[in-house]
Amino acid sequence: MSAPPANVRRAPRRGVVVEAPLDPMGAGEPSPAPPPTSRSVRPPGPARGEPRATAKAAQPSRLSRIAQVVAGGAIVLAASAAVGWGARRYIVSSPRFAVRTVLVDGAHRRPADKIASEAGVAVGGNIFAIDLRNAGASIPAADPWIERATVTRKLPSTVQITVVEREARALASIGGDLYLATRDGDLFKRAGADDPLDLPLVTGVTPEQVASDRAGVVLTVKRLLDVADELDRTGISKTRPLQELHLERDGSLVATVGREAILVHLGQPPYRDKIEQASRVLGEVARRKANASILFLDNDAHPERVVVRMR
C-alpha cells in the first residue's frame, strides 16, 4: 500500500463514540430526514376543542404600556432632579463663585461700602445667593439720596451695583423743618447736617397742604423751580444769585435775589416776560450805580409798568 501524500494528516484514532438510538419503527436503521421543501411550515394549531388564545392575550395590555412609560418618566425625572441638586450644591458652595469684588458706579454722595451694605452684598458670600431684584430695591429704600439702583453679576466672582443719585435743587421750609427738593419738586428727605444747605429756599408751603395734597405740592415746587431756571437763563442769577422763592397765600410769587436781598414781586404766572423785564431793569439800575430794594412787576392791568423802590 502506498504512503499518503505529505499534506494530508492521518486522522487520530477514534475513541468511544455514543451514537443516537435507532428508530424503533425502522428495521434497525435510523430513518432518513425528509428532503427540505420550499413551502412554509406553520406551527400546528391547538387540538380540537382546546380554547384558542386571542391576540390581546399575546400582546401587552394598554395599561401595562402606560405603566412602563410612567415608570420611565419617573426615572428620568429622578435622575434630572439628582443632577440639578448636585449642580446647585456645587454652585452655592464652590469657592469659585465666592464674591471677591464689588463695583459701585454712579455714587458721589455715598461711599461704596455703605451702598454695598444696603444691598446686602458682602465679599466672601456666594454670588448666586444674591437676590438681584431685592438687592437693587433695598438700596433706595434704605437711602433717600439714591433714586434707583440695579445689581448685576459678572461671573465668576464680581458684583456690580449701578446707582442713580438724586440731585437737590432747593430747600423747602415746611412747618419749621427744611426738606431737600429735586428739580421735579420731589421732597425726598429732611435736611441734615451733612446735606447741602447753600440752595435756594422755597417758602410758603404749609404742612396742611403736604398732608392733604402732596402731589399738588410737588407740582407747585416744580413750577417754582421753573422760575429759578428762568432767572438763570436771563442772567440775573449770575450777578444776583437766587436766595428765596416765596409763595403768597393768593398764589402770587416773590423772588429774593442778590446778596443785598432785592425783592422781585412777580405776581401771578406766567413769569417769562416778567423775568426778562426784571433783568432789563436791574441792568439799568446797575448801570446807574444805584441800589434797588424792591421791584414790582405784579401789575397785571399794566404789565409794561415796573415800579422800583430804591434804598
Image (cartoon, helix red, strand yellow):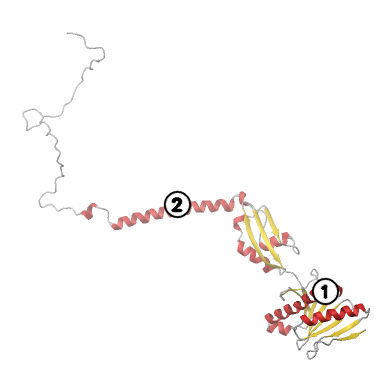
* Real-space Cα separation, disc 1 to disc 2, in angstroms: 75 Å
Q: In this image, 83 relative to 206: left or right?
A: left
User: Can I make out residue 171 in this image?
Assistant: no
User: Label 2 crowding class (10 Å Cα cut-off): few <14, some 14-19, many 20+?
Assistant: few
In the drawing, what numbered circle is on residue 235?
1
Report helix, strand or loop for mark 1: loop
Examine the rendered structure and indicate whether residue 166 appears above or below residue 250: above
In the drawing, what numbered circle is on residue 79?
2
Report helix, strand or loop for mark 2: helix
Q: Spot the residue most to the bottom.
A: 301
Q: Amino acid at mark 2?
A: Ala
In the image, 191 versus 57, the foreground residue is 191
Q: In this image, 119 relative to 89: left or right?
A: right
Q: In this image, 28 relative to 241: left or right?
A: left
Quarter of image, res 25: top left
The residue at 87%/73% (across/down) is: 239
Task: Determine whether label 1 and label 2 are within 8 Å by CB.
Answer: no
Residue 159 percent coordinates (x, y): 65, 56
Quarter of image, res 246: bottom right
Examine the rendered structure and indicate whether residue 246 appears above or below residue 119: below
User: Label 1 crowding class (10 Å Cα cut-off): few <14, some 14-19, many 20+?
Assistant: some
